[in-house]
Amino acid sequence: MSDFSQTLLNWFRENGRDLPWRQTRDPYAIWLSEIILQQTQVKQGWDYWERFMHRWPTVEALAAATEDEVLREWQGLGYYSRARNLHFAARQIVALGYFPNTIEGIRQLKGVGDYTAAAIGSIAFGLPAAVVDGNVYRVLARHFGIDTPINTSEGKKLFQSLAQSLLPSSERFDQSPSSFLLPPSSEYNQAIMDFGAIQCTPQSPRCLICPLQESCDALRTGRVEQLPVKQKTLKVKERRLSYIYIRCKGETAIHRRGKGDIWQGLWEPWLTDEIPPAAILLQQHVKHVLTHRILLADFYLLDTDERPLLPEDYIWIPEVDIDNYGVPRLVERLLSLVPRGGDSYPHDH
């Protein structure tokens, strides 16, 4: 084992995070945590993981749920394709009859890429597969002084190869699910991820108390803030939206986003470019930041006794049932602006 790997393991045994999905070798619980944490900070994802595990404690239970139920439980986490893929993959697993226990098999699950497959495989089954995520890129780039951009094909191959070469051997390890010992690959993968999250952070890394400071190339050459290198990508674009919440005799109108949409399967109020004269502005330019787009939404309330003419894909539901429908985080924020009761909204806009 390399000095680098041993140092990380020693650090992890004293400083590793105590997370609930680390107290089990259940591949379902581990897979669920990895999907939730793909685009989510641990602090936020923890609550969602616990709620999912409480509501659907097995993959069979999750597979039996409807997509609407899963999307509703996921509400607020964003990147909703993860929830749809999670539900689809649960049904894949049930159809298979067992949770796949090879990297190739895990990789076949919808929504599972190389990193997630390696994480699940190593943690749940002790498979010798190295993980490479943002934390790993950062730690390896800084320690070994690598300036190849991490978002290029060359960079991905380079870092994957290096990460795999640093993985401790799993020989002679007890791989039974009842074993309380962590597989070497599992412990190392968790160690380097935690090291990046706690010690070698993106901003203000704790270099002065770092156990790798003597061998860190970036620290020695003054490039800590410059590494890892990322090639510039597409410019973020702005898009303006106007939503109208209709209140008509205790009912409101919503429609479901279609296929191929980032919010596929989720619901939203009337989206239109033509604002009725009677609509009252509740909030202007509510900002919502996505990966490659910034949304600026205006939100109106239309209180009327007659249903306006809407596109045919809109449905009318009782207002009291709106919380039963999964909506994007932006819409959730906008709905919180709607006054309850019908006559408490502002009239001076």
Image (cartoon, rainbow, N blue to C red):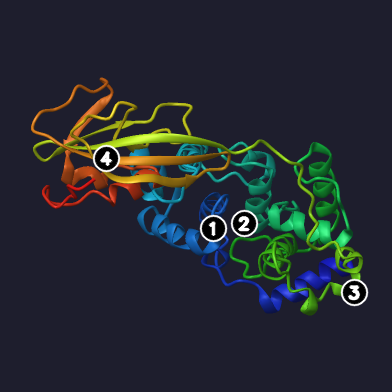
- Please say if 264 is above or below 324: above
Q: Which is nearer the eye, 165 or 214?
A: 214
Is the residue marked by circle 4 packed among few (<14), some (14-19), or many (20+) residues within 10 Å?
A: many
Residue located 81% across and 76% down the image: 211
The answer for how far apart the CA atoms under marks 4 and 2 are is 49 Å
Q: Which is nearer the eye, 113 or 57?
A: 113
For the residues labelled 1 and 2, say whether their Cβ atoms are less than 8 Å apart. Answer: yes
Q: Which residue is mark 1?
A: 26
- Residue type indicated by callout 1: Asp
Residue 265 coordinates in the image, percent (x, y): 38, 34
249 left or right, relative to 172: left
Q: Which residue is mark 2?
A: 124
Q: Which is nearer the eye, 266 or 110?
A: 266
Is the residue marked by circle 2 packed among few (<14), some (14-19), or many (20+) residues within 10 Å?
A: many
The answer for how far apart the CA atoms under marks 3 and 1 are is 38 Å
Element assignment for label 2? helix
Quarter of image, res 122: bottom right
- Please say if 7 is above or below 256: below
- Please say if 209 is above or below 128: below
20 left or right, relative to 101: left
187 left or right, relative to 322: right
Mark number, residue 300: 4
Residue 170 seen in the current view: no
Q: Which residue is mark 3?
A: 214
Which mark lies nearer to you, 3 or 1? 3
The answer for how far apart the CA atoms under marks 1 and 4 are is 47 Å
Element assignment for label 3? helix
The mark total stands at: 4
* First in residue order: circle 1 vs circle 2: 1
